[in-house]
Image (cartoon, rainbow, N blue to C red):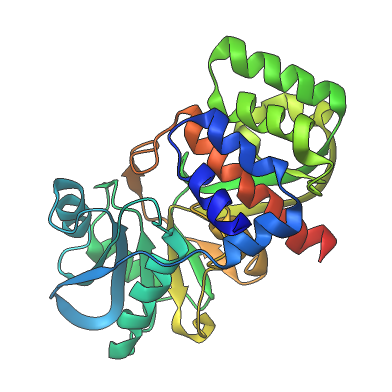
């Protein structure tokens, strides 16, 4: 079956094998994304202070050092660790499962955090900030990996070529890989816009092309008010990327940024090599389908 073939290619550790996924039609790729099986999940709860805030942390190892440190950042709050790993790992599914479990205690707020964070501000400050918030989504103080501006740009061909060259010379995998895939497969797969982090483009954004949309992306850390939690919060068709962008787009008129700081590591879970971005381009295909082609 074609879906099995796509899964085998996508699960490869060879970027050139993963690239072959994009030789399939868009409809085949989207059907595969929507029908991927779920991995096995294991939940571990760290009992804490019962109250209005529960923390959900997806992790590959609920007993590992990263999970322990991430949990300690929120002490003494109740923490739910959702363990899942392997080629079928899906961030959205882990988060949705954790949120569903968290809602059993009817909290007012559910914090969703990666497991690669480090403490700067404590739980008491978080609670103080949330005590006056009424928004549906709350974001932490801006950093490189959360609460940052992204733009959807219909890029000019010459800019994609330049982006590819700069990516190669400067050894920037996202620039090199995304531009290459967009130039080679983008038109056929319906990729009209590219999702870029504004800080990575800097002043070159003016030359990139037509900016179709811009938002503040929650990224690796977000806090959700229970009034916006209805069923699955994150779109599970996305494969470990862009689900945060799509949710942030939907919440653009109902969010605020609070003075709460956390730090995190770059690419601690998925890495920052070419393989990650060869795989993540399927999310660009799906996001473009949702926004411009559905």
Residue 149's place in the image compared with 100, above or below, is above
Image check: 274 left or right of 103?
right
Percent of width and height locating residue 107: 33, 84
Percent of width and height locating residue 154: 83, 41
Quadrant in the rendering for residue 43: bottom left
Nearest the viewer among 116 and 283 is 283
Residue 176's place in the image compared with 88, above or below, is above
Q: Is residue 256 visible?
A: yes
Quadrant in the rendering for residue 161: top right
Percent of width and height locating residue 247: 59, 65
Image check: 9 left or right of 182?
left
Residue 18's place in the image compared with 147, above or below, is above
Residue 113's place in the image compared with 195, above or below, is below
Point 30% across, 76% down: residue: 53
Nearest the viewer among 242 and 224 is 242
Percent of width and height locating residue 100: 37, 81
Nearest the viewer among 185 and 145 is 185
Q: Residue furthest top?
A: 169
Nearest the viewer among 251 and 67 is 67
Q: Is residue 241 visible?
A: no
Image quarter (top left, top right, bottom left or bottom right) of the C terminus: bottom right
Image check: 235 left or right of 54?
right
Point 65% across, 45% down: residue: 150
């Amino acid at each position: 079956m074609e879906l099995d073939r796509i899964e085998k290619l996508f699960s490869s550790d060879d970027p050139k094998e993963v690239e072959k996924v994009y030789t399939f039609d868009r409809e085949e790729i989207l059907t595969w994304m929507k029908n991927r099986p779920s991995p096995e999940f294991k939940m571990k709860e760290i009992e804490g202070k019962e109250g209005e805030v529960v923390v959900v942390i997806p992790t590959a190892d609920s007993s590992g050092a990263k999970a322990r440190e991430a949990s300690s950042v929120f002490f003494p709050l109740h923490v739910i660790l959702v363990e899942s790993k392997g080629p079928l790992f899906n961030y959205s599914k882990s988060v949705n499962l954790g949120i569903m479990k968290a809602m059993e205690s009817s909290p007012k707020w559910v914090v969703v955090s990666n497991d690669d964070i480090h403490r700067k501000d404590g739980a008491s400050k978080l609670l103080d900030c949330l005590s006056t918030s009424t928004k549906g989504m709350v974001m932490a103080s801006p950093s490189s990996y959360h609460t940052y501006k992204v733009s959807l740009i219909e890029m000019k061909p010459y800019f994609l070529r330049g982006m590819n060259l700069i990516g190669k010379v400067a050894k920037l995998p996202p620039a090199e890989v995304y531009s290459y895939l967009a130039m080679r497969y983008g038109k056929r797969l319906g990729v009209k816009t590219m999702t870029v982090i504004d800080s990575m483009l800097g002043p070159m954004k003016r030359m990139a092309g037509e900016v179709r949309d811009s938002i503040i992306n929650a990224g690796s850390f977000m806090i959700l008010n229970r009034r916006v939690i209805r069923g699955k919060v994150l779109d599970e068709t996305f494969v470990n990327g862009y689900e945060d962008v799509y949710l942030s787009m939907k919440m653009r008129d109902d969010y605020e940024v609070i003075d709460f700081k956390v730090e995190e590591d770059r690419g601690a879970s998925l890495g920052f090599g070419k393989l990650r971005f060869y795989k993540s381009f399927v999310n660009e295909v799906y996001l473009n389908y949702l926004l411009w082609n559905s």
